[in-house]
Image: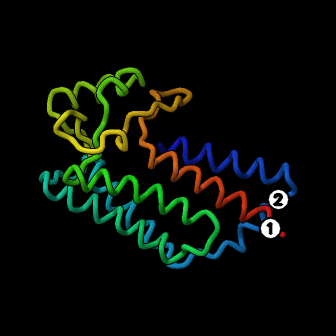
Amino acid sequence: MIFWIAAVALAAILLALAFGGKIRNLSRLHLRFWPIVFLSLIVQIVLFSGLITFSSIWIQVLYVFSLFLLMLFVLLNIKVPGMAIIFLGILLNLIVILANSGYMPADLQAYLKAGKVESAKVLENTGFLNNVRIASEKTHLNFLGDWMILPQPFQAAAVVSPGDLVLLSGLFYLLLRAMVQP
């Protein structure tokens, strides 16, 4: 997903430049309480880096907490163009994650098609991998889970959710609007 965040940001910047946007306009983008984003990312890095082992319940609680932090940041900046779209993306992900006790349902076949063979093996053997659990008839709202495949150069493709795509769209719009100002 990190590749796609960077790719979307680059595409938005290039398109904005093509339409007369200016990179210096990004300095006018005032996002309040931005350290909240870093706190959320730190929580997720600690959770999923493998440096510290957490019990299942702590993974669920801390992961949901990190998403609530992101939602708080977005809500505190909701007047910024694009933030409402980003909010919707996070909300879609949070809905499916809460419906599945703190895990995102993930389609095993999508992982295999994406070339994520090792991840698929772990999912198949344990039912869980980091913040995802294998999608089944026992999971809820699977259509909002990770099932879409986005190609990535030089590595296995990304398996993403509809909420991730909405979030990326919001990021694209935010950067485009920030650079192309009247």
Element type at mark 1: loop
Label 2 crowd (10 A; few <14 / some 14-19 / many >=20) = many
Residue drawn at x 24%, y 44% as measured from the top left: 140
Residue drawn at x 77%, y 48% as measured from the top left: 15
In the image, residue 120 sits, relative to residue 97, either above or below, namely above
The residue lying toward the viewer, choosing from 180 and 98, is 98
The residue that disc 1 covers is: 181
Q: Amino acid at mark 2?
A: Gly
The residue lying toward the viewer, choosing from 177 and 36, is 177
In the rendered view, does 34 fall on the left or right side of 125? right
Element type at mark 2: loop
Q: Position of residue 16 (x, y in %)?
A: 78, 53
Q: Amino acid at mark 1?
A: Gln
The residue that disc 2 covers is: 21
Say how the picture is coloured.
rainbow
In the rendered view, does 76 fall on the left or right side of 59? right
Indicate the quadrant containing the C terminus: top left, top right, bottom left or bottom right: bottom right
Give the mark nearer the N terminus: 2 vs 1. Answer: 2
In the image, residue 120 sits, relative to residue 100, either above or below, namely above
Q: Position of residue 13 (x, y in %)?
A: 73, 52
Q: Position of residue 1 (x, y in %)?
A: 47, 43
